Amino acid sequence: MPAWVVPLVVVGCVLLAGWIYLMATGFKACPPEALLLVIRRGPPRRIVRRTERGRVFVWPFIEEVAILSLAAMPVPLTLQNSISRDELSISIAATFTVAVGGADWLRDHAVEHLLPLTMFQREALARQLIAGVLHARAANWPAADLQRDRSNFLAQARYLVERELNKVGLMVLSVN
């Protein structure tokens, strides 16, 4: 057997093992109710691909994976001592169910604003935005109208809350 065959077999085995390792570790599956983002490493970090389902190939050492949950989260909210238009103190209790929006522009906003946050921080952000809108909306309504027509108040508040939440990539699914 010639002397060059042994080094060639060793190099072939090393290349085959490297290829098998690359194929085994490179494919990433997207979990249910999540958005899988493939991010290019390096100084200009940018999103290369995003998928909601299936599997993607990620080049090790060149790209990394981030996952953004699309699951709905309930945001219970009780505003105490909110001031109405006739300067009476009122309490407002509501539960907003919010989730990452389905439109591409909403997902872009969600990736920009929500990806670095934990689920607890996302809920706190949504609570702050909702509370601000409800306080401002309650200040424009008389206390008697709030008590009498709560559903109309929440319908108008939902529209305004959705506009604010869209800025960070969230949308309102329901209000109770």
Image (cartoon, grey):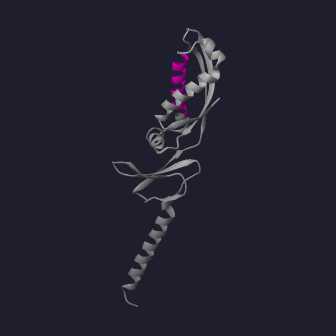
| Residue placed most toward the observer, 137 or 80 | 137
Of all residues, the one furthest to the bottom in this rendering is: 1
Q: Is residue 23 magenta?
A: no
Residue 100 image offset from top left, x and y in percent: 53, 40
Q: How many marks?
A: 0
From which residue to which does the magenta span run?
A: 123-138
Q: Is residue 11 above or below residue 153?
A: below
- Residue 3: give x, y in percent of width and height: 37, 87
What residue is drawn where x is 56% and y is 25%? 156
Residue nearer the viewer, 75 or 44: 75
- The picture places residue 31, in percent across and down from the top left corner, at 57, 52
* Of the pair 149 and 83, the residue shown nearer to us: 149
Name the quarter where the N terminus is drawn. Answer: bottom left
The residue sitting at 59% across, 39% down in the picture is 72
Residue 75, image x, y percentages: 60, 31
Residue 74 in the image: above or below residue 34:
above
Characterize the magenta stretch by its predominant secondary structure: helix
Q: Quadrant of the C terminus?
A: top right
Q: Is residue 125 magenta?
A: yes
Point out the residue furthest to the left here.
43
Q: Nearer the viewer, residue 63 or 75?
A: 75
Residue appearing at x 41%, y 83% in the figure = 6
